[in-house]
Amino acid sequence: MTNWPSDYNQAWTLAGASERSGVGLHSGQTSRVQLRPSERSGYWLGWLDDPALPLHRLGPECVSDTRLCTALLLGQRRLATVEHLLAALAGCGVSQAELWVEGEEVPLLDGSALPWVEAIGESGLRHCGVRQVPDLPEDPLLLHQGSGFVLAQPAKTLQVSAAVDYPQPAIGRQFFSLELTPSLFVEAIAPARTFGFREQVDQLLAAGLIKGGALDNALVCDGDHWLNPPLRFADEPVRHKLLDLLGDLALVGLPQAHVFAYRGSHGLHTALAAAIATLQVAGFPPGGMASAPLPRTLSPTSVTTGPLPSPARP
Ligand SMILES: [Zn+2]
């Protein structure tokens, strides 16, 4: 059992190295990731199979595809399915680390962040001073896409909430919210596994995708039941949504905010990370956020900042 940091106010790196290998969900190829300490803040990616390439700092500007997972483009090389590993690092309080990868995709392992938490636990943590927390404007930052949205509002601590609403009765409507600490992340979020739908799985397999998908690394929902129970939590899907949200926010660093995702997606989560990253550079213009430049990645998404309209009174 590791002594996790009590909150996200301090900077931590790994005290040593650890490694995991396994099959990538989409490619079906075996890949390997080594986690190592970093003296610099943020997450830095190097290639075990091409160590001469410079380390690349991960950020929302690296995001190249969010349709089935969060994939990054780092120079000429693509790296898919980074979200569960990044969620584990950020969720456990590790704000800086080097990730050395062999392959094109982070291994899926059991579909949750728990195996990465165990790898981090093996390394142990080393304190690196006070963490640089990304600033947020006082007004809520709201991004929406279709019927989903993400909202971030500064708070004294990190509070994360998610809601999902699926027509499949096995999932239906679920809501989960907590004031996050590294130990609560390890207990309540990290074990939640990725999930998919039987009809979608058949289509993706026919299209040559999810070659590494199996009933032991993803929960598969078939209407009113699960093909591979038992679940780790009755509301495992919404907890996994929070895991994905944290992994995508890790690209900019966890904010001190209440972040709420309703029908969230990697597209929305990474757009929020990109909006926060842009604001760190552009600052918050006096007189409101409306004139702040917003990232290009937001094109399919609408962005609103400022107070939400109050509900009509009877
Ligand atoms: Zn996921």
Image (spheres, rainbow, N blue to C red):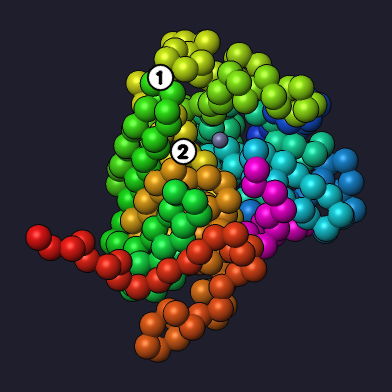
Q: Is residue 245 above or below residue 136?
A: above
Q: Is residue 83 visible?
A: yes
Kindly state the secondary structure of the residue where label 2 is placed: helix
Q: Residue shown at 52%/41% (left/top)? A: 244
Q: Is residue 124 above or below residue 230?
A: below
Q: How many marks?
A: 2
Looking at the picture, tell me which residue is in the foreground, 89 or 129: 89
Which residue is the site of mark 1? 170
Magenta includes 150?
no
Q: Is residue 38 visible?
A: no
Image quadrant of ligand 1?
A: top right
Residue 86, position as x, y percentages in the image: 58, 44
Residue 132, position as x, y percentages in the image: 48, 66
Numbered label attached to residue 239: none
Q: Is residue 282 above or below residue 119?
A: below
Q: Is residue 148 above or below residue 27?
A: below
Which residue is the site of mark 2? 241
- Mark 2 belongs to which amino acid? Lys
Q: Earlier in the sequence, mark 2 or mark 1?
A: 1
In three-dimensional space, the C-alpha distance between marks 2 and 1, rounded to whole angstroms, equals 16 Å
User: Circles 2 and 1: CB distance less than 8 Å?
Assistant: no
- Mark 1 belongs to which amino acid? Ala
Residue 72, position as x, y percentages in the image: 72, 50
Looking at the picture, tell me which residue is in the foreground, 196 or 47: 196
Image quarter where the N terminus lies is top left
Residue that protrudes farthest toward the left in the picture:
314
**In the drawing, does residue 134 fall left or right of residue 271?**
left
Q: Residue shown at 37%/88% (left/top)? A: 287
Residue 106, position as x, y percentages in the image: 70, 36
Kindly state the secondary structure of the residue where label 1 is placed: loop
**In the drawing, does residue 310 fall left or right of residue 180?**
left
Q: Which residues are magenta?
A: 55-67
